[in-house]
Every structure is written in C-alpha cells, then in structure tokens.
Image: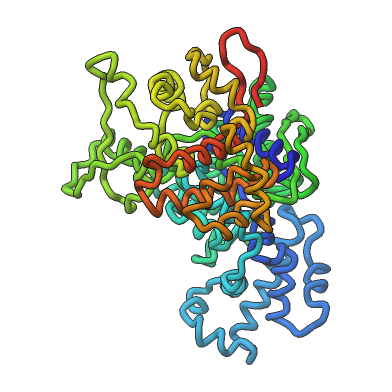
Amino acid sequence: MSNSDNELISSVTRLINRAGRSPYLFVGSGFSRRYLGTEDWTGLLRYLCGLASDEDFAYERYLAYADDDARYGKLPSVATLIDRDLRLSVLESDRFSDYRAEHSSEIRAQESPLKVLAAEHLASFSERFEEGELEVLKEAGRRRVAGIITTNYDRLLEELFPNFATFVGQDDLLFQRTFEIGEIYKIHGSIDDPETMVLCAEDYKELDETRDYLAAKLLTIFVEYPIVFIGYSISDPDIQDILRSIVRCMKPEYRERLRDRFIFLERGENGISTHSISFEGVGTIEMTKVTTNNFGLVYRAIAESKSSFSPSVLRELRKSIYSLVEGDAPTERLTVQVGFETLDELPEGQAFVLGVGTPATSEAAYGHMVKAEKLYEDVVLDNGYFAPKLVVREYFPNLLRANSGGLPMYKYLASYDGEIEDPALRRQLAEKNSVDSFLNSSLRRARENVRARYSELSVKGVVAEEGAERAASRLYCLNEDEIDLDDLRGYLVDLLRGDKGVLTNNSELKRLIRIYDFLKYKKVPDKSANSGRETT
C-alpha cells in the first residue's frame, strides 16, 4: 500500500472519529453500477424500451415526446410514457404472452409492468465486481456503519449487511418502529416489491407531496451522524434537494460543522478537498470531497474508526429500552449471559443481560485486570472491546512490569485522548519506532540469511514456503514495504482462531503481533506531558 493510500485512510478515519459517531452511508446508483454492473437510469429505460418495441430508436422517440419542462426531469417523464404503452402491450401483444401467464395477478391488480420488468431485470445481476472492496465494506459494516440510506432498488446492500433491518419507502418509516441504527432505508423502493419503486413522474409527484416525514427523518440523521455519500454526483438532484433543506433550516455557524461530517466519495486520483455548494437565496454549504479509484481505502478508513458495539447490537439495546419505557409486558424468552466479544454472534431477537450499576469500590471502577494475551487477541481479532482509557491508564502500567518484551499498544493509543503518564509506556514508545526495533541483536544478525531463503519476500511467500506454524518465527525478516497488512492480519486471524492456546509461551508470535500493531496503528500523537510532537 502506497504512502498516498495510507494518508487517505488516516485522513478519512480522523474525519469520522472527530464526529464522534459511526457514519451513515448514503448510497446511490453508481454503487450498483460499480459492483453489479447495472445500467444507469438511461440504460435501464433503453432496456425496457427494447422489451416493448423492436424499433431502433424507440427510446429516442419517447425522449422526444417527453416534456422538456417536466418538474421532475425528462427521465421520469420518459418512464411514464413507456409504462403507459407497456400496459396496453402486455394485454395485446404476442411478445408478452409469457408475461401474461406469469403475472396474471399483477395485471388484474393493475400493477405497473414497467416496474415488474425493471425489478426482474435488476434481480438478474448476480455477478460481483471489485469483490475485494466489498469484503472490506462488509467487515466495516459489522461494527462501524451506523446505517444506510439508499435510492437503489436492488438487494446488494441487504446482502452486504445481513443483520440490518430494511425499511422500504415512506410507508415503512411511518408505520413501523425505527431506531436509526443498524437499519437500511430504501427511500425509492425495492425490487422485492416493484410497486414501491420510484420510477415514473407520478411516483416522484407522490413522493414530493408526502415526503414531509421522510425529509424530517433524513434531516435528523444528516445533522447527527457523519454521512459518506457513495455512488452519487454532488450535482445529483436528490442530493441537492436534501442539502438545500439543510441549508435552509440551519444557521451559518452550525453549517460550518457539517464540512467535516459530509464526505463525498468520487473516482479520481487520491485526494481530499473542500467543496462548496451555493443555493440562491438560501445560503452555502461546504463538504469534504474524497477522490480515489480504490473505494476500499475509504471502506478501510470506516473500519478503522472508533466504535464500541456493532450496529445490530445497539439496535437491539435501543429496541429493548424503548419497549421497557413504553411498558411492554415482559416475555418468557430465554435470556443468556454473554461476553462482549460474542455479542455479534447472537441470533436476531436473542435476549441478553446488560449490567448497569455503581461500583462498590474504587478498584471495581476499572473492571477486572485482563491478561496480556487478551490484548494480543484483540489487536488481531478486534473482539475485546476494551476502553482505550482503561487500557492505557490501568492495564499497561501493570502488565508492562511482567512483560519485558513489551505489549501491543498502538491500537489503544490511537483512540486515547489523554496524556501518557506511565514512564514504562513512554519508554516503550520511544524505543519501538521501527520494525527493526522489535528485533533482538541475534535476529538482526540472522535477518539477511533468512531473507535469502525465500523466492518471494512477502507474507504469502514466507507462509507458503515455511508453513503456517513456522512462518510466525520467520516473518520478522520482511521489510516494512514488503508487508501487506491485510495478508498479515489474515494469517494471524487463522492462527488465533485455529488454536486457542497458540499464544501461550509463543514469544515469536507475540513479537509478530506487536509488529502488526505498530504498522497498522503507528501514527498516534505523543501525549506525554509537555510534548507537542507527533510519534510515527
């Protein structure tokens, strides 16, 4: 990964952390085009025209008939014209005999054939592109995506975020309880219910006339959460309408706070800039524009942002609290006691115990001391959910005395806001400032000879030649630019999950995890007293 990539990841992570909440994703049609290969709106209408007619210029004919001054744009007007003709064609034309046989109930219910055919077409896109990016996003979604708003009709987001609750259209938002966490809002409908799809001019008119609640819901989310826009152009009319509403209802001094919270993702060379939009007679809003051709960098930044619990867990907690406050009768469902590291694995609806109270002693205020092995596991598996303040102020001073080789520490320091007071920890930070500093003198002397053994100097190359068990004691020979952090984490995850006791008396593996911790989280501010430096 290049320095430019790492800088972009760090910058976006800082933006999200500064907001103090996990982000919402606002996902547009460009997302589905990138990962499913679907058409844009014009392409979809051209496809539907091809079903309705053999004419070479059928789409252009509809475009010519469309109202140039249509309030909602020409494309919804084109969709209306195609839908009108399709309603007659499915009843009269021989080419739609199969449609009549398969969709007799929809025909009798006078449902839109345009929407039914569009839904079937979009459902046929099953191949995935840029799967590496999607895997990073899926992992980020487990704990660090608060929710999703989308105008897309397809099911890709539900497949990537299977534990999120999905709400389709304004009716779902009006008549179902929502909790604004761990939820997907499909505001333009879904292929699972074609009649909900906003395609024609009449659909936009109905949405416009009844969107007050939806607009209020979106505005609440927009001012409370950082928003990452994916698959939209900044000039998109839907986005412009929302931003105009925000500008209209917020004073200029409050609008300034949104600049770092609104993050637009667009294709281009790596870069971050400020973009302004002015609305005549209303005001101006600024946002952050992130350009990159590798969207996985932004997804990784989301994955590395601060978060305590997964959205699905927080949604269950909020749901339970709402039910308690509203006086729902208790149920007899089985309740389980569970550790934080397995909360994400609970089945949907499973009740669990959450203890809240005042500690009886000052010692209890910090919880039970953990073993060093738990910190090593957490750095790799991200399953400990330790409070950084607790680790830095309480765990490190005690554990460092019994672990002379050091501890993985940069993950916790990256999210710690206070000063570093413990002398042993400050000494570790000063000493461990490069991969080489984690090696003893004998390893440094042997390093070049070990490197000469391998035809490919990479994590995968060493693991392939040494085997998983021995590789942990050989990977130290790689230079920093030869270590792919994703490959290293994948290797470490397999080791830790494959053998629960693998860390016991395994100094080589612990050293490797400390190196991984250093490389992944090393850019943290030096918070020792009277210091204004930054440690890298």
The furthest residue to the bottom:
94
Residue 270 visible in the picture: yes
**Relative to 125, is 238 above or below?**
above
Image x and y of residue 258, in percent? 65, 29
- Left-right relation of 327 to 13: left
Q: Looking at the image, which residue is at 56% across and 13% down?
A: 528
**Relative to 456, is 217 above or below?**
above
- Left-right relation of 304 to 45: left
**Nearer to us in this view, 92 or 461:** 461
Q: Looking at the image, which residue is at 39% across and 32% down?
A: 372
Q: Looking at the image, which residue is at 73% across and 82% down?
A: 53
Quadrant of the image occupied by residue 276: top right
The furthest residue to the top:
530
**Nearer to us in this view, 252 or 510:** 510
Quadrant of the image occupied by residue 126: bottom right
Image x and y of residue 102, in percent? 50, 84
**Relative to 23, is 92 above or below?**
below
Quadrant of the image occupied by residue 219: top right
Image x and y of residue 448, in percent? 67, 44
User: Which image quadrant: the C terminus?
Assistant: top right
Q: How many marks?
A: 0
Residue 248 visible in the picture: no
**Relative to 343, is 466 above or below?**
below
**Nearer to us in this view, 289 or 513:** 513
Image x and y of residue 469, in percent? 47, 53
